[in-house]
Amino acid sequence: QVQLQESGGGLVQAGGSRRLSCTASGSNFAYAAMAWYRQAPGKQRELVAGITSGFKSNYADAVKGRFTISRDNTNNAVDLQMNNLKPEDTAVYYCSGTYPGFREYWGQGTQVTVSS
C-alpha cells in the first residue's frame, strides 16, 4: 500500500516562493508517474504539474515559467518549487501518484495561501 504525504504549505506573500514536498511510502516509486494538483475554493481540482518515471515534465499554462516539478527516486520524493506566487495560486495542493497497473494514490493535501 502506498501512502503519499505532502508538506511545505503555508502563507506566503505575492511574489514570494514556496517549495512543496511529497514523500511516498512503499515500493515502485521510480516507476510511478507523479503529479501535483490543486483545488481552490469553489473550483474543480486541476493539474498543476506532472513528471513521468522518465523525468519528463509538463505544466499547466497558468504556472509555466514559475513552477518546477522534480523527483528524487532515491528518497521517494517529488517536489514542487513555486516562484513568483500569485493570489490566484491559493489552493489546497495535492500530490498524486499513478503506479504500475494504473493504481492511483493521493495525499491528504496541503494548503497554500498567497496574500496580496
Image (cartoon, rainbow, N blue to C red):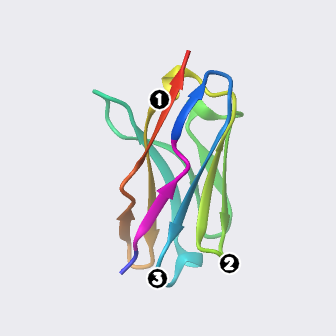
Residue sitting at x 52%, y 54%: 7
Residue sitting at x 40%, y 50%: 109
Vertical arrangement, residue 59 with respect to residue 33, above or below: above
Highlighted magenta segment, given as a residue range: 3-9
Badge 1 crowding class, 10 Å Cα cut-off, few under 14, some 14 to 19, many 20 or more, is many
Residue 91 part of the magenta segment: no
Residue 114: x and y in percent read: 53, 26
Badge 2 crowding class, 10 Å Cα cut-off, few under 14, some 14 to 19, many 20 or more, is few
- Dot 2 amino acid type: Thr
Residue 81: x and y in percent read: 67, 45
Foreground residue among 19 and 61? 19
Q: Earlier in the sequence, mark 3 or mark 1?
A: 3
- Quadrant location of the C terminus in the rendered image: top right
Q: CA distance from mark 1 to mark 2?
A: 30 Å
- Dot 1 amino acid type: Thr
Q: CA distance from mark 2 to mark 3?
A: 12 Å
Q: Earlier in the sequence, mark 1 or mark 2?
A: 2
Foreground residue among 6 and 49? 6
Residue lying at the far front in this picture: please name it. Answer: 11
Image mark for residue 90: 1
Residue under circle 2?
A: 74
Label 3 SS: loop
Residue lying at the far bottom in this picture: please name it. Answer: 27
Residue under circle 3?
A: 26
* Contact between labelled residues 3 and 2, with CB atoms less than 8 Å apart: no
Residue sitting at x 32%, y 35%: 44
